[in-house]
Image (cartoon, coloured by chain):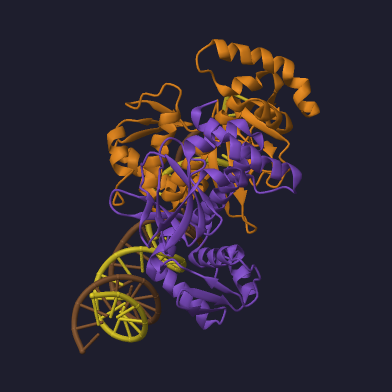
Chain colours: A orange, B purple, C brown, D yellow
Amino acid sequence: MSGAAQTTSQQTQATWQVIQGGKAADPLDLLAGSGVTISLSRDRELHAQGDRAEFCYRIVSGCVRTVKLLEDGRRQVGGFLLAGDCLGFDALDTHDFAAQAVSDVVLRRYRRREVEALMDRHASLARGLREMAARELRAAYDRILLLGRKTASERIATFLLEMAARQPGGRLGGCKVALPMSRSDIADHLGLTVETVCRMMTHLRREATIAIEPGQVELRNPAALQHMAADPRH
Amino acid sequence: MSGAAQTTSQQTQATWQVIQGGKAADPLDLLAGSGVTISLSRDRELHAQGDRAEFCYRIVSGCVRTVKLLEDGRRQVGGFLLAGDCLGFDALDTHDFAAQAVSDVVLRRYRRREVEALMDRHASLARGLREMAARELRAAYDRILLLGRKTASERIATFLLEMAARQPGGRLGGCKVALPMSRSDIADHLGLTVETVCRMMTHLRREATIAIEPGQVELRNPAALQHMAADPRH
DNA sequence: CGAGCACTTGAAAGATTTCAAGTCCAGTGG
DNA sequence: CCACTGGACTTGAAATCTTTCAAGTGCTCG
């Protein structure tokens, strides 16, 4: 019953009707009215590590990376967010990682207070966001397995297949996968060095498993990648 | 308004009153009535990888590990759960990792259907579990940083300090930290081999930073550990 | 008392990193 | 319009951390 909840209740109510009437809609549609559209240019920060978590976001277009830093400069890229992905809905009071635009980015920004209030009013939204958090957690455990137990070549293969699966037109065979992030971003995501990432990619190119083009790769032999993603020895 | 929700609503209502009247209580108290107490002996599984997620659990005593396996037998221990910790509240339809008793264990088991229904009825419970999921996610990102970017000695130091912080009587200086899990469990948790874990522990013992005893270690110089947890060299 | 398993320790092997050049472009200024 | 500069990307060789392979110790359970 907070002020924030009151001010948004009208548009929310309208959206709710639509969902009731239609098929199982995106639970986030409930938020449609309460967001603001923002544009950010390459390398700008959505929020810094430690910032109060006032807002959460949904990517409209472009690519965002989440980043944690160690005091001595070592960097871990938690993940890359593409169009449709959400960020910060499950934060606590502060963000414990930074979020930065990998490319020019358009996103929709929501006030967390309002989202929280809406969740208390609409169990369906709460359920939807809960499921989203569960998916994130599952992805995090997959990454923990990758970082804890997979070799460099397995990590690269897994990463390429993951990016391919997230591509809009999701065919695997001979599809071009956009890689808007730098090699260094990929390295810091996979717990490797830039050089190792390069060597592995070069190796895949020489085997004709992939073709490297600026800003993207073409998967010429996805089966080989899939095999490689589960086999420690090359 | 499912049947499950109806059958639990009476005891829930009673608990709810208590929470309203008292200080900010454990949101899980709402579940008090709907669980069953279970005992499991060492190495038994709470659930296997891929099992339908019918139940979720709260550890009463003992230690539980979560485990993911690769086809070729490589193993990643996601984490260790101690008394008070929860498991499976944020699962999707299936568990994507196994949960196994590290020691003899007593736990409280809840039916997820009932928990879901209660969440829809009580926004406060939903909020509490949401916050719990957020904490888990934060811990997962910390582990990703550890596995992606920290050296073996940093991993060990971080692990020992983490376990110490979770100890019931939370003093750090000269405190004994129970380590119910095997070296091999620790290795698979930190992305190392058993041998490396042993060597690092031995090293710490020789420096008199810790004292090793069966099933536990004593932190003799926590400051040294803290320094080591953030310094890649030694 | 013996077997088996967890744990420890040492030495050799290996995967990845570090260090060191280059190459290739895109954007800039002459 | 074109050379120049800086950054991203590649590639090679040496160094290093961790693993792998090999024993050996010690403890617990039959």
Q: Can residue A24 be seen in this view?
A: yes
Residue B151's x, y, as percent?
Answer: 50, 63
Q: Nearer the viewer, residue A95 or D15?
A: A95
Is B99 placed above or below B43 here?
A: above
Image quadrant where residue A148 sits: bottom left
Q: Is residue A40 visible?
A: no
Which residue lies most toward the right here? A3
- In-image side of B147 versus D11 (left or right): right
Is A75 placed above or below C13 here?
A: above
Residue B65's x, y, as percent?
Answer: 44, 56
Figure label count: 0
Measuring 55% from the left and 81% from the top, which residue is drawn there?
B207
- In-image side of B176 versus B103 (left or right): right
Q: Nearer the viewer, residue A219 or B40?
A: B40
Quadrant the N terminus of chain A occupies? top right
Residue B70's x, y, as percent?
Answer: 33, 49
Is C11 placed above or below A135 here?
A: below
Image quadrant where residue B33 sits: top right
Residue B114's x, y, as percent?
Answer: 51, 36
Measuring 64% from the left and 37% from the top, which residue is drawn there?
B13
Measuring 68% from the left and 18% from the top, which residue is drawn there?
A12
